[in-house]
Amino acid sequence: MKRRPRKKEVNEMFVKTNDETIKKSDYPLIIVTVVLVLFGVLMVYSAGSYTGERLYGTKFYYVYKQLFGAALGTAAMIVMSRVNYHVLYKIRYVILGVSIVLLAIVFIPGVGIENYGARRWINLPFFTIQASEVSKFGFIVFAASYIGTREDKITKFKGILPVILVGGVICVLIILEPNMSVTMCMAMLMIVMLFLGGAKIRHLLCIILPLVAAAVLLIIVEPYRMARLMAFLDPWESPLSEGYQLIQSYYGLGAGGLFGVGLFNSRQKYLFLPFAESDFIFSVIGEEFGLFGCIAVIAAYVFMIRRALKVSLGARDRFGSLLCSGIAAIIAIQVIVNIAVVTGSIPPTGLPLPFISSGSSGLIVFMSSIGVINNVKRNSPKSSELLFVRAKKPKLAKSDNTNNASDKKADDAKTPKKRFAFFGRRKTENFGL
């Protein structure tokens, strides 16, 4: 008699508790998301107005596309905030299948669009879709559902093979476009998800070492990748070819100084800096708003990631916890890689800045992901609100201060100090991460 697979595990995963749900949206997370999106629209206009006018006849070309993506992303964020995130678990294979099919469709002539020697976009009547952006979210949903229901198996190498297999298939399809930057991003996301799920370090090393070897091989076999690596080591060796983009990014960041040259006053956007509205938009931000503007943008991302991790700590189950952690991880990975490329910290590669860079596909997917995080927060136990409340220190009377001074010093000497309190005060219950 055929039985349903893993029914017991699923029931244990979605066990009901007596705790009431919060039922409140994470307004700080939503606000910082909206601020980043609006700032992105502004910067896309500033960085892409001249290019749009020269190439497409209107300086609002990139702005229209960004506003379209922002509108659809807002609608998707609202919908995902209202739909219970456990629905994603039920349709996890559908989401994964659609992600892989979209990656395969880009190779069909007439459907996939070839641009700059790569097939990464699917041509639709009103806009284009970058399939790799959808695949990131599809992999997060699959990995979170698989790891979340197999806590006992994930510590064995055999238990993590399905995640490696799915991640490997997605990475192969993306590298065939070719798109090495997103491939590396997916590989790092896979490692992070397995690490958060409880995989052993030695098993992760068995994955990381072959991935590093494969990355080196891919760089060696492709001349343009090797040329980019050499340009990263010394961009002034080829200032008019491979090193040109990085040098222009340096000029933009250097011209900005501490406070920038002012909004809309960038000079690098006048066809000096390639892809100023997308991959290198952070350089334009640095030029127009200076070092302090860059710090403010980074601080907004840190706040968003920190907020998402707080929601993951307070999630009702492991699936919700890993879902939020995976979304926070992909945002962090893309922000770090993009800023590192723009500042010349790693070899040049094309990876957009989330919520800010031009591109409607990525904007819609990332805003949808924020809606998922918000829904996890809304369905979290009421007791997890302690994670979002800063505890107030009790006020002591003046007479008590002198009397308790010696007792306090004695207690401090006995009590070990916490070395890390990034997430604030936490409940003693295990939230599943």
Image: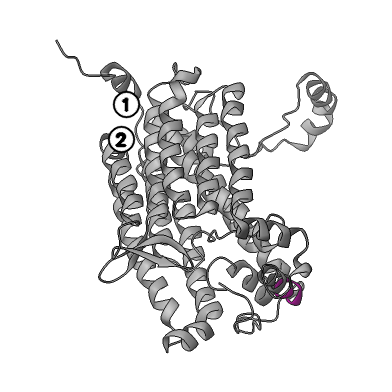
Q: Amino acid at mark 2?
A: Tyr
Residue holding disc 2: 89
Disc 1: CA contacts within 10 A as few (<14), some (14-19) or many (>=20): some
The residue under the point 37% across, 55% down is 131
Q: Could you tell me residue 305's position as x and y percent?
A: 55, 48
**Label 2: element kind:** helix
Q: Could you tell me residue 16's position as x and y percent?
A: 30, 24
- Residue sticking out furthest to the left: 1
Question: Label 1, label 2: how many angstroms apart (C-alpha)?
Answer: 10 Å
Magenta stretch containing residue 148, yes or no? no
Is 241 situated left or right of 48 in this image? right
**Figure quadrant of residue 91:** top left
- Which image quadrant: the N terminus? top left
Q: Amino acid at mark 1?
A: Phe
The residue under the point 45% across, 37% down is 168
Residue 406 visible in the current orientation? yes
Magenta stretch containing residue 252, yes or no? yes
Residue holding disc 1: 14
The residue under the point 58% across, 47% down is 218
Disc 2: CA contacts within 10 A as few (<14), some (14-19) or many (>=20): some
Q: Are marks 1 and 2 in contact (CB under 8 Å)?
A: yes
What kind of secondary structure does the magenta stretch mostly adopt?
Answer: helix
**Label 1: element kind:** loop
Highlighted magenta segment, given as a residue range: 251-255
Given residues 367 and 358, the one toward you in this image is 358
Above or below, comparing residue 130 to residue 384 in the picture: below
Is 308 situated left or right of 259 in this image? left
Q: How many marks?
A: 2
